[in-house]
Image (cartoon, rainbow, N blue to C red):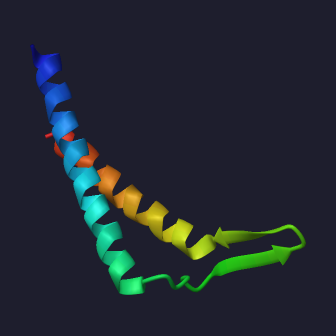
Amino acid sequence: MGNLENLGKLLVVLGVVVVVTGGVIWVAGRFFGNRQLPGTVHIDFPGGSCIIPILASIVISLVLTVVLNLVIRLLHK
């Protein structure tokens, strides 16, 4: 039964993480609108274009690292 309890805790924590992440993205979308963050590389070429969000990728990586570390610490208590 201990394994099912741990699985239940994990699912609850992951659900909370998904809800919080969705809320942050929703608020950020209202705050930033349709603008691009600084550090976004936009390359136009015949037949298409390519957008590389370097700063956004770094920010998302940092946020996910913090969130996952918090989840791991909460699960090991």
Residue placed at 18% from the left, 46% from the top? 74
Position of the C terminus, as image quadrant, is top left
Residue placed at 69% from the left, 71% from the top? 51
Q: Is residue 76 visible?
A: no
The one nearer the camera, 3 or 23, is 23
Q: Quadrant of residue 6?
A: top left
Q: Is residue 46 visible?
A: yes
Residue 41 location in percent, x, y? Answer: 70, 78
State the residue lying farthest toward the front: 47
Residue placed at 25% from the left, 43% from the top? 14
Q: As displayed, is residue 48 above or below residue 40?
A: above
Q: Is residue 68 left or right of residue 32?
A: left
The one nearer the camera, 71 or 12, is 12
Q: As displayed, is residue 52 above or below residue 32?
A: above
Position of the N terminus, as image quadrant, is top left
Q: Quadrant of residue 8?
A: top left
Q: Is residue 48 left or right of residue 38?
A: right
Q: Is residue 75 left or right of residue 50?
A: left
Residue 27 location in percent, x, y? Answer: 29, 76
